[in-house]
């Protein structure tokens, strides 16, 4: 252990990281020394620009637990940093939880712009759950634009995290029972009072009136 | 008989030297409290785990053939968001200062971090061992074993601070099984997908 | 400025780093002592809630009074001293709590050793017997036989003389033997 730590420290110096070096995170000792050094350098660079380091390390540890090769580990770590960076830029000022959820959302296909709009809708309230639900819905197969439109409306309504989580659970259940993901979201969203979705759940352009075939929106039912 | 007595003490101490499980978020809670140093505090202990007034929200057993799983969330009432990311500690005074002023460099009003109890359940009748790995335990495949409960169910309960965690189950030390009824983590290039649990605040 | 992580950095360096203004570095010390001291707190107080509370309190107090730690290389014993005091306060203040979590640990420990029924029962008996000891005897027994401290070190921590500590340990052993005789010979 001592030898490996010194080796990592040496590799750190060789890499010449311009970021303020924190020294090796002991947990990275699970990786081979060279990979650990690169990951540490990535972590240091990320920290220097305000990106939380813990999710980067978590990704590396996940790779180590799966016994991934060095190249796959680094590819995954770098991909994660890109996601975190985009989420951080879109959500700042943001908590670590929000950035992690944002990274997941971007990883599943949400746009950074959607995250920024969510931040504008809730400037001072924790967004971890709404962003997380956005990521979860897209991950389940809901069309990206529909999920974004629905979450934006739900976020700007006075809907609590518990209710958003329940919303996501009900959509999951509907999908498991055979509903198409986007339709499932549209139905549940209407029940929650979301407006301006046409019959197939696509967001309408602003100013367009609803189609005659679409059901009327039901006011939000809150327990 | 001295030998007999020494043997007993030896057995006792060997038993007592066994490691004791401590929840993975302990470090986070301590550091969060230290960042709160300057903020007016309520009782500091109300956010420790207390087993009472549990609400069950079963998701139902939705799963593919193989390992049927259900994730049940046990919720203790909670408030507030996690403190924001503290800026990297770049500009530190070179002279020694008391720890109290070092705490001021971090947030001015970090809210109290709340801990929520989460129970993970996996139905795996043919398994010999099941462990939980994820962000909350540094993906350590040995640190969080599940206990076999009634019949085919394996469970473990861990305290988590608010946040979003990727996790998965490891069955018999080699088979990585995502939680079929939990949301999936985005594809992570590792082959099998992982699951996500979001622990949130109830106020917002 | 070089950072701090990894096993090769001594407590003294970390303490000095924290006093120089890097509060985050304290997390290193928390990680180092958490598990070992959690074990002590758990056996002193008998349940997880109180043990975690006492341990957390000790770490927090350690941080706040870190400037008064006169020998930074002895942070560990200094923190233990704080923890001992926290446990004494907690033991006096709290009522007995439900032992549910202790059962869980016993189950896990027994699963690890592969002798389910016997090991769990044995562990339960030990913990029950431990709880029946006079707190100061329990404390001395744990410090000597579980934490493996010398009597001199224990004297420094508790402020009690070596001969008095030896007497407490002896009495604790006698009482434990008495309480566990039946279980042991069964």
Image (cartoon, rainbow, N blue to C red):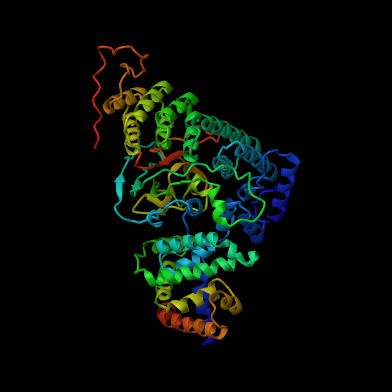
Q: Is residue C181 above or below residue C103?
A: below
**Can residue B188 be seen at all in this image of the molecule?**
yes
Residue at the extreme bottom of the image, as rendered: B1
Residue located at (44% from left, 82% from top) = C175
In this view of the protein, which residue sits in the foreground, B177 or B88?
Answer: B88
Considering the image in quadrants, where does the N terminus of chain A appear? Answer: bottom right
Count of numbered circles in the view = 0
Q: Residue at x 54, y 78 (%)?
A: C159
Above or below, C83 against B102 in this view is below
Q: Residue B74 location in percent, x, y?
A: 34, 48
**Residue C123 seen from this side:** no
Where residue C59 appears, as percent x and y from the top left, is 51, 60
Relative to B96, is B191 on the left or the right? left
Residue C118 found in image quarter: bottom left
- Describe residue B148's horizontal placement relative to residue C69 as left or right: left
Q: Position of residue A95 (x, y in %)?
A: 48, 39
Tell me which corner region of the image, top left, top right, bottom left or bottom right, holds residue C185: bottom left
User: Residue C26 placed where, x, y %?
Assistant: 57, 55
């Amino acid at each position: 252990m001592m030898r490996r730590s010194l080796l990592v420290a040496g590799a750190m110096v060789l890499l010449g990281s311009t970021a303020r070096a924190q020294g090796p995170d002991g947990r990275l000792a699970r990786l081979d020394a060279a990979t650990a050094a690169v990951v540490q350098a990535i972590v240091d660079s990320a920290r220097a620009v305000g990106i939380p380091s813990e999710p980067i390390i978590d990704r590396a540890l996940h790779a180590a637990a799966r016994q991934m090769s060095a190249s796959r580990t680094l590819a995954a770590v770098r991909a994660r940093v890109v996601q975190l960076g985009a989420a951080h830029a879109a959500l700042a000022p943001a908590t670590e939880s929000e950035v992690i959820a944002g990274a997941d959302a971007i990883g599943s296909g949400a746009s950074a712009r959607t995250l920024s709009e969510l931040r504008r809708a809730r400037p001072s309230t924790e967004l971890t759950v709404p962003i997380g639900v956005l990521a979860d819905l897209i991950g389940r197969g809901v069309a990206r634009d529909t999920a974004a439109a629905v979450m934006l409306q739900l976020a700007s309504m006075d809907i609590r995290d518990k209710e958003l989580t329940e919303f996501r659970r009900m959509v999951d259940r509907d999908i498991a029972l055979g509903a198409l993901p986007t339709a499932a979201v549209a139905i549940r969203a209407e029940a929650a009072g979301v407006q301006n979705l046409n019959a197939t759940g696509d967001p309408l352009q602003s100013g367009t009136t609803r189609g005659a075939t679409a059901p009327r929106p039901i006011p939000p039912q809150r327990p | 008989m001295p030998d007999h007595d020494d043997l007993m003490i030896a057995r006792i101490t060997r038993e007592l030297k066994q490691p004791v499980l401590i929840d993975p978020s302990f470090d986070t809670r301590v550091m969060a409290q230290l960042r709160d140093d300057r903020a007016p505090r309520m009782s500091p202990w109300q956010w420790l785990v207390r087993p009472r007034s549990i609400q069950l929200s079963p998701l139902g057993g939705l799963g593919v053939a193989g390992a049927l799983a259900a994730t049940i969330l046990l919720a203790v009432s909670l408030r507030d968001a996690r403190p924001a990311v503290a800026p990297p500690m770049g500009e530190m005074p070179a002279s020694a200062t008391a720890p109290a002023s070092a705490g001021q460099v971090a947030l001015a009003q970090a809210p109290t971090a709340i801990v929520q109890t989460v129970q993970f359940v996996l139905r795996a009748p043919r398994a010999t061992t099941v462990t939980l790995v994820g962000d909350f335990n540094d993906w350590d495949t040995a640190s969080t074993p599940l206990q076999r409960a009634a019949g085919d169910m394996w469970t473990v309960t861990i305290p988590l601070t608010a946040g979003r965690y990727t996790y998965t189950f490891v069955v018999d030390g080699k088979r990585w099984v995502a939680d079929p009824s939990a949301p999936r983590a985005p594809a992570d290039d590792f082959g099998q997908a992982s699951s996500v649990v979001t622990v949130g605040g109830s106020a917002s | 400025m070089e950072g701090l992580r990894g096993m090769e950095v001594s407590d003294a360096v970390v303490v000095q780093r924290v006093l120089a203004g890097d509060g985050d570095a304290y997390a290193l010390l928390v990680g180092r002592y958490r598990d070992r001291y959690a074990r002590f707190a758990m056996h002193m107080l008998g349940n997880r809630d109180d043990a975690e509370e006492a341990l957390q309190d000790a770490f927090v107090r350690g941080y706040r009074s870190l400037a008064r730690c006169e020998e930074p290389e002895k942070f560990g014993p200094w923190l233990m001293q704080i923890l001992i005091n926290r446990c004494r306060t907690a033991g006096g203040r709290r009522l007995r709590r439900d032992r549910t979590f202790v059962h869980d640990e016993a189950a896990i420990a027994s699963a690890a050793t592969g002798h389910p029924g016997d090991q769990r029962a044995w562990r339960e008996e030990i913990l029950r017997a431990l709880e029946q000891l006079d707190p100061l005897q329990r404390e001395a027994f744990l410090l000597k036989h579980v934490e493996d401290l010398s009597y001199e070190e224990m004297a420094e921590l508790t402020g009690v003389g070596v001969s008095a500590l030896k007497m407490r340990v002896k009495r604790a052993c006698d009482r434990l033997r008495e309480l566990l005789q039946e279980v042991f010979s069964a």
